[in-house]
Image (tube, rainbow, N blue to C red):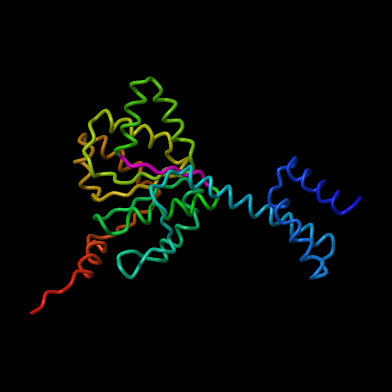
Amino acid sequence: MTESAADAAIETSCRVLHLPTVRSQFSEMITRAERDQLSYRGMLAELLMAECEERDRRRSQRRLQAAGFPRQKWLSDFDYTANPNINPGLINNLANCDWVRAGQPLCLIGDSGTGKSHLLIGLGSAAAMAGFRVRYTLAAKLVNELVEAADDRVLTKTIARYGRVDLLCIDELGYLELDRRGAEMLFQVLTEREEKNSVAIASNESFSGWTRTFTDPRLCAAIVDRLTFNGTIVETGTDSYRLSRTAAKQPTSAS
């Protein structure tokens, strides 16, 4: 077989076998193998490892897109010096995703501007990169979706869909008061996931203030119980570092 015929056969075979990375890197790998005197076995191993690595990267990218994060936030970008309330060791431990494997909850509690959403998205992204199915949503958006599903008589299917993901990230819980119907539907989602799949929430209200969001005291207590049992609570404090940074950038007035 001539070299041109061999190249054509490799091109066709890679398309049939869905090996795009092998197809794109084969010529370069041949040149490198000749230069570095790689064995046939070594060159084949390099090609197959490159294909596997690229597939892992694409799968991770798809999981990140499927999660629905509103913006990209990574734990490596978090400024711990701006908020000394947050223990870097604890966050690094959470990034290992053992709590997700165990189906345990996580609560990020603190005022606006203290890094809750950054940590929520960062930990959710770490879970997606580790191979877990993740879904992000705002609390109000989730409740609205559940109400619409109930009206369309597909509530059971919607709750089951939210129950299947490995980690459900609910942001801005506690910002808006929920009526009893919406709160009960949210409770159903939490119950569907209880001790099976993880829920991570970010809230600007301490648990004692959740009675303003969930006006039924018994339902409120049940929701708090679902979100804290065997879980981790991270308190991010009350001092907004976003506000501090904005203030620091303002020009000082001349005396």
Relative to 40, say whether 155 is above or below.
Answer: above
The structure residue drawn at horizontal position 48% and vertical position 54%, both measured from the top left corner, is: 126
- Residues rendered magenta in the picture: 132-139
Report x, y in % for residue 82.
Answer: 30, 68
For residue 30, side relative to residue 164 (left or right): right
**Magenta segment main secondary structure:** strand
- Looking at the rendered structure, the number of numbered marks drawn on it comes to 0
In front of the other: 222 or 125:
125
Dividing the picture into quadrants, the one containing residue 192 is: top left
In front of the other: 75 or 90:
75
Relative to 58, say whether 115 is above or below.
Answer: below
For residue 204, side relative to residue 158 (left or right): left
Residue at far right of view: 1
Report x, y in % for residue 37.
Answer: 83, 69
Residue at far left of view: 255
Dividing the picture into quadrants, the one containing residue 50 is: bottom right
Residue at far front of view: 4
The structure residue drawn at horizontal position 78% and vertical position 64%, both measured from the top left corner, is: 31
> Magenta stretch containing residue 136, yes or no?
yes
> Magenta stretch containing residue 146, yes or no?
no
Report x, y in % for residue 148.
Answer: 33, 26
Name the quadrant of the C terminus. bottom left
Report x, y in % for residue 201.
Answer: 35, 47
Dividing the picture into quadrants, the one containing residue 15 is: top right
In front of the other: 242 or 12:
12
